[in-house]
């Protein structure tokens, strides 16, 4: 349970969702004082909802002053980052650092090459626009790869991944990061702010979706749900057929044929730590 505070904390979480299930235990064990918000104030959090077109300062008076403010929900387009930061600072002053959680999906400008923190990204994307606005205000952005851990189980995503063999054919590289490593990344940014930076945060691996599908199917034998088991085996059969059709001798496929790939070394090197979950379980 979180205790509501109206004074001062080291780190304020705006939006206590999935990430907070890993972050809050780490903050507690690291003796980093913290508070968190939800829209309803559940679990003893502070009730707060960001309303982009409102200039009312009253909701911000219920928030504590913080050294670092983490935004876990997406901001979009022009003006939202300025509004949120401006209203908070009008109440609590400007001596704070901001972190925005984003998505690596904006790194889509080099579809058959490597993207790093310094690579081109979709500057017209609504989330990227808001992130760049926050960066201009001195904040940093953590663009996260596929999130897993806890309630997020990658092998359960197959129905959303594809519905046909042709959908599977189109799948190439995929990247992941565990929730515990996201929490560690946030704490690292709190300890060592990197104003104006955008970072790619992943587990330093490139995964082949075909290879993962085969791995998931190997777990199907123990499934009690017959429909679930049959679904995974069907996906594995499609991968086998595609390997024959496209001349793929073994999995994982050659890196050059997997499409967009993410180089996430920059963040971990800068902060002097490495992922604890270096491989998808």
Image (cartoon, rainbow, N blue to C red):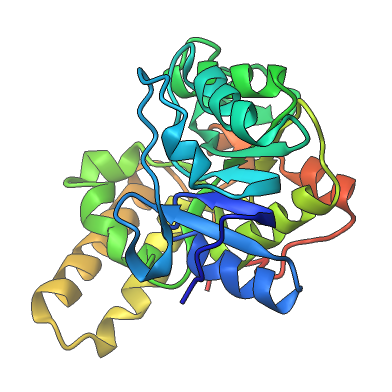
Image side of residue 64 versus residue 137, left or right: left
Is residue 213 placed above or below 141 in the rendered structure? below
Image side of residue 34 versus residue 243, left or right: right
Measured from the top left, where is residue 15 in percent x and y? 44, 50
Q: Nearer the viewer, residue 4 or 99?
A: 4
Measured from the top left, where is residue 81 in percent x and y? 54, 23
Q: Quadrant of residue 55?
A: top left
Q: Nearer the viewer, residue 113 or 264?
A: 264
Please name the residue shown 17% across and 66% down the image. 231
Please name the residue shown 22% across and 85% down the image. 223
Q: Nearer the viewer, residue 253 or 31?
A: 31
Image side of residue 183 versus residue 220, left or right: right
Please name the residue shown 54% across and 46% down the image. 145
Measured from the top left, where is residue 248 in percent x and y? 47, 49
Asked if residue 47 shows in the view, the reply is: yes
Please name the residue shown 24% across and 50% down the image. 160
Image side of residue 40 versus residue 52, left or right: left
Q: Residue furthest left?
A: 227
């Amino acid at each position: 349970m979180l205790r509501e505070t109206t004074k001062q904390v080291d780190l304020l979480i705006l939006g206590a969702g999935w990430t907070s299930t890993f972050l809050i235990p780490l903050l507690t064990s690291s003796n980093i004082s913290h508070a968190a918000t939800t829209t309803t104030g559940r679990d003893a959090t502070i009730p707060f909802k960001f309303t982009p077109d409102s200039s009312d300062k009253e909701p911000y008076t219920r928030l504590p002053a913080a050294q670092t403010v983490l935004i876990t929900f997406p901001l979009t387009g022009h003006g939202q980052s300025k509004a949120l930061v401006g209203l908070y600072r009008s109440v609590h002053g400007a001596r704070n650092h901001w972190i925005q959680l984003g998505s690596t999906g904006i790194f889509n400008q080099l579809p058959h090459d490597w993207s790093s923190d310094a690579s081109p990204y979709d500057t017209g994307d609504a989330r990227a626009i808001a992130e760049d606005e926050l960066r201009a205000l001195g904040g940093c952005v953590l663009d996260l790869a596929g999130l897993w851990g806890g309630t997020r189980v990658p092998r359960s995503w197959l129905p959303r991944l594809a519905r046909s063999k042709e959908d599977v054919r189109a799948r190439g590289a995929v990247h992941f990061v565990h929730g515990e490593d996201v929490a560690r990344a946030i704490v690292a940014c709190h300890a060592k702010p990197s104003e104006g930076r955008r970072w790619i945060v992943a587990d330093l691996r490139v995964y082949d979706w075909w290879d993962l599908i085969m791995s998931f199917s190997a777990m199907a034998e123990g499934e009690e749900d017959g429909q679930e088991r049959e679904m995974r085996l069907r996906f594995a059969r499609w991968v086998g057929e595609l390997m024959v059709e496209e001349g793929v001798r073994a999995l994982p496929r050659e890196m050059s044929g997997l499409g967009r790939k993410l180089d996430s070394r920059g963040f971990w090197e800068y902060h002097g730590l490495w992922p604890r979950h270096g491989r998808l379980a």
